[in-house]
């Protein structure tokens, strides 16, 4: 449940300084988490694979805290740029018993051609490097925890699955048919852990402006774009980094390591 009064307080603070926008992804399986920004609760009881926000916060170093059952799971600072838009993911490292970490991913809200879609896929599940397949073919190999793929793809539906790196099985998640909508940035976060059967994805979409060009613009993974688009949260029970497999059909692909705290 979101805490209605707190975002307003954060927004008031932001009036005195340039603001950035934060979305928080709860990627710790089996936990119901309260999320704090600079010591103020902005969301309560956030279940795994849920996305909350956006929260307007002053630019600068912001402290993100996740608390479950009165115990602090993680407490880290995140850099927020003026006019930036980013996802902050609370998740476990590759080791399922590892202490939760926070990884941030800037969102680039650039225009895409009218028949194309932007896609961000982030591996934030408690599992080692994985291969991502489309129609049985490995299109991206050895994707590690904390890494992400940024692509521009034709809008449509794709069949995807994920397997351990260098192996044909067992399938960790999928196969699943996933649809990517034209004119949107779709952000997909793999969360959970295979052995406990908690693998899942959190999905959110942001509307993007349209360009008249038939060619995709560059996907810039350096800094976040302007926070002008409306977030449409679409949590999903569909399996995994699956959408990363769409990268095989991408017109442009960027692979990067996000900032971990």
Image (spheres, helix red, strand yellow):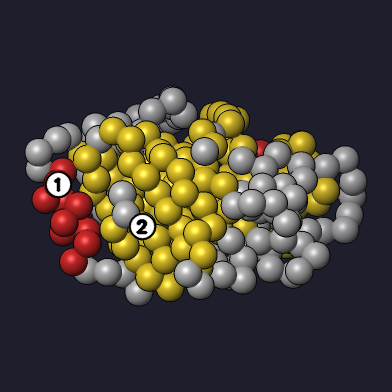
Is there any visible trace of residue 167 in the rendered image?
yes
Q: Position of residue 180 (x, y in %)?
A: 50, 54
Residue at which label 2 appears: 36
Q: Which mark is residue 71?
A: none
Q: Measuring 89% from the left and 50% from the top, which residue is drawn there?
A: 168
Q: Residue at x 46, y 39 (%)?
A: 105
Instruction: Report if the CB atoms under discs 2 and 1 are less than 8 Å apart.
Output: no
**Percent of width and height locating residue 227:** 26, 42
- Left or right? Give the position of 164 relative to 41: right
The answer to whether 191 is drawn above or below residue 149 in the figure is below
* Snapshot quadrant of residue 54: bottom left
Q: Nearer the viewer, residue 248 or 168?
A: 168
Q: Is residue 161 above or below residue 84?
A: below
**Residue 257's x, y, as percent?**
58, 31
Q: Pick whichever of labels 2 and 1 is earlier in the sequence.
A: 1
Q: Is residue 202 visible?
A: no
Task: Decide if residue 22 is on the left or right side of residue 11.
Answer: right
Judged from the image, the secondary structure of the residue bearing numbered disc 2 is strand
**At 40% from the left edge and 49% from the top edge, which residue is drawn?**
64
Local crowd size for mark 2, using a 10 Å CA cut-off: few (<14), some (14–19), many (≥20): some
* Residue pointed to by mark 1: 13
Q: x, y (%) of residue 7?
A: 22, 58
User: The residue tagged with tag 1: helix, strand or loop?
Assistant: helix
How far, Cα to Cα, is label 2 from label 1?
15 Å
54 or 103: nearer the eye? Answer: 103
Residue in the picture at 47% in, 69% down: 70
């Amino acid at each position: 449940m979101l805490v209605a009064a707190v975002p307003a307080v954060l927004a008031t603070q932001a009036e005195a300084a340039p603001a950035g926008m934060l979305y928080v992804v709860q990627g710790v399986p089996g936990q119901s988490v309260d999320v704090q920004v600079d010591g103020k609760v902005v969301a309560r009881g956030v279940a795994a694979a849920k996305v909350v926000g956006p929260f307007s916060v002053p630019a600068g170093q912001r402290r993100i805290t996740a608390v479950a059952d009165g115990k602090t799971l993680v407490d880290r600072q995140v850099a927020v740029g003026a006019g930036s838009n980013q996802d902050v993911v609370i998740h476990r490292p590759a080791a399922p018993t590892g202490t939760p970490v926070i990884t941030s991913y800037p969102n680039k809200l650039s225009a895409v051609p009218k028949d194309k879609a932007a896609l961000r896929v982030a591996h934030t599940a408690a599992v080692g490097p994985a291969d991502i397949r489309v129609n049985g073919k490995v299109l991206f190999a050895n994707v590690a925890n904390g890494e992400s793929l940024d692509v521009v793809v034709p809008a449509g539906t794709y069949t995807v699955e994920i397997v351990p790196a260098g192996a044909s099985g067992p399938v960790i998640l999928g196969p699943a048919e996933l649809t990517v909508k034209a004119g949107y940035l779709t952000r997909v976060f793999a969360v959970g852990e295979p052995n406990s059967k908690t693998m899942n994805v959190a999905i959110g979409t942001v509307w993007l402006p349209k360009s008249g060009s038939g060619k995709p613009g560059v996907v810039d993974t350096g800094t976040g774009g302007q926070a002008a688009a409306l977030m449409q949260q679409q949590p999903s029970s569909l399996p995994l980094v699956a959408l990363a497999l769409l990268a095989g059909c991408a017109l442009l692909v960027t692979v990067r390591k996000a900032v971990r705290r």
